[in-house]
Image (cartoon, grey):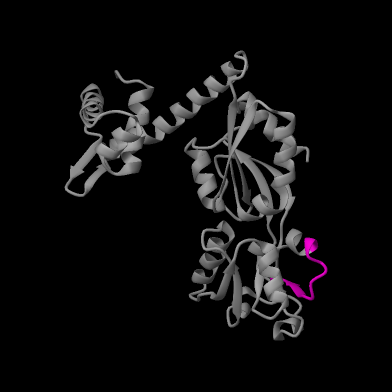
Amino acid sequence: MHFDLVDLRLYLNVLEAGNITAGAAHSHLSLAAGSARIRAMEASLGIELLERGRRGISPTPAGKALARHARTLLLYAEHLRQELAEYALGVRGQVRLLCNTTALSEYLPELLADFLRDQPHVDIDLQELPSQRITHALRQGAADLGIVSDAVDTRGLETRPFRDDPLILAMPEDHPLCLQPAPSFADTLAYDYVGLASHSALAVYLEEQALHLGLRMQLRVRAEGFDAVLRMVARGAGLALVPLAALERNRSLALCTRPLGEPWARRRLLLCARGFDALPHYAQGLYQALRES
């Protein structure tokens, strides 16, 4: 094989863009140069990596395998750059951390702020995703660390406990479901909900749980953040499922709260990675800060 990291980045950019023109531009290459590099990769391997059609390109089975390994190689190359950057004055490192909605809003702001204050040479690329997408990204080598719900499959990853994070049903004080000690999720779907923004990982997760039951959540309004959601619930706008930590921050609101009967609502948050001991120095520091918090 005769290709380099520029080729691998170009190839992944082409796959993400869906065509060679945009992928080459994202790699700061001309279309001719980008096409030539892709053809040289295919000639070097003796196989086609891309299926070319009128609507763009798609990877062949061999192309999918290359993409998987390319992500891993580029991640390791970035780890190498970060480790060596410690010896160069003024060079910053970056840790990519993926987390679900609750971790981002309830537990991480102060922890990450303290870490960044104490580690001025480190930046954090923080992104909110559903837990299942986080574990997939970690397996693909597309991130250093993740914080996920224990309801998802973490096979192939190392995990450590992070926080207990049960989801609690919040209702106006006069709601009929207040008479039940532990309503089921199906029971709640007969009533209107106040939900988080549609891009929220928790919103996506709850809507998926409703679909598993063959039902849909009746969302009257969406809000940015648990505080706004709970304030609307307290004024009678509907129900909400929120983490216990969010309720504890809003104890002054007039709310009726109940645990859900489903096991998936009695969740824990986990720190996870492909291998904690294999993390680069920068990510090791963040991992230790989160674990010790």
- The x, y position of residue 188, in whole percent, is 62, 78
Specify the quadrant of the image occupied by residue 259. bottom right
Direction top: furthest residue: 87
Q: Is residue 250 magenta?
A: yes
Q: Which residues are magenta?
A: 248-260
Direction right: furthest residue: 252
Residue 250 visible somewhere in the drawing:
yes
Which image quarter holds the N terminus? top left
- The x, y position of residue 143, in whole percent, is 53, 37
Specify the quadrant of the image occupied by residue 217. bottom right
Relative to 166, does residue 148 appear above or below in the rendering? above
- The x, y position of residue 196, in whole percent, is 59, 65
Residue found 74% across the figure and 44% down from its top? 110
Q: Is residue 90 left or right of residue 48?
A: right
Q: Is residue 98 left or right of residue 256?
A: left
Residue found 62% across the figure and 49% down from its top? 148
Residue 242 visible somewhere in the drawing:
no
Residue found 25% across the figure and 37% down from its top? 21
Along the viewing direction, whichever of 8 and 278 lies nearer the viewer = 8
Residue found 69% across the figure and 77% down from its top? 183
Q: Is residue 176 magenta?
A: no
- The x, y position of residue 7, in whole percent, is 33, 25
Along the viewing direction, whichever of 256 and 228 lies nearer the viewer = 228
Along the viewing direction, whichever of 274 and 78 lies nearer the viewer = 78
Which image quarter holds the C terminus? top right
Relative to 194, does residue 40 appear above or below in the rendering? above
Relative to 129, does residue 89 appear above or below in the rendering? above
Direction left: furthest residue: 54
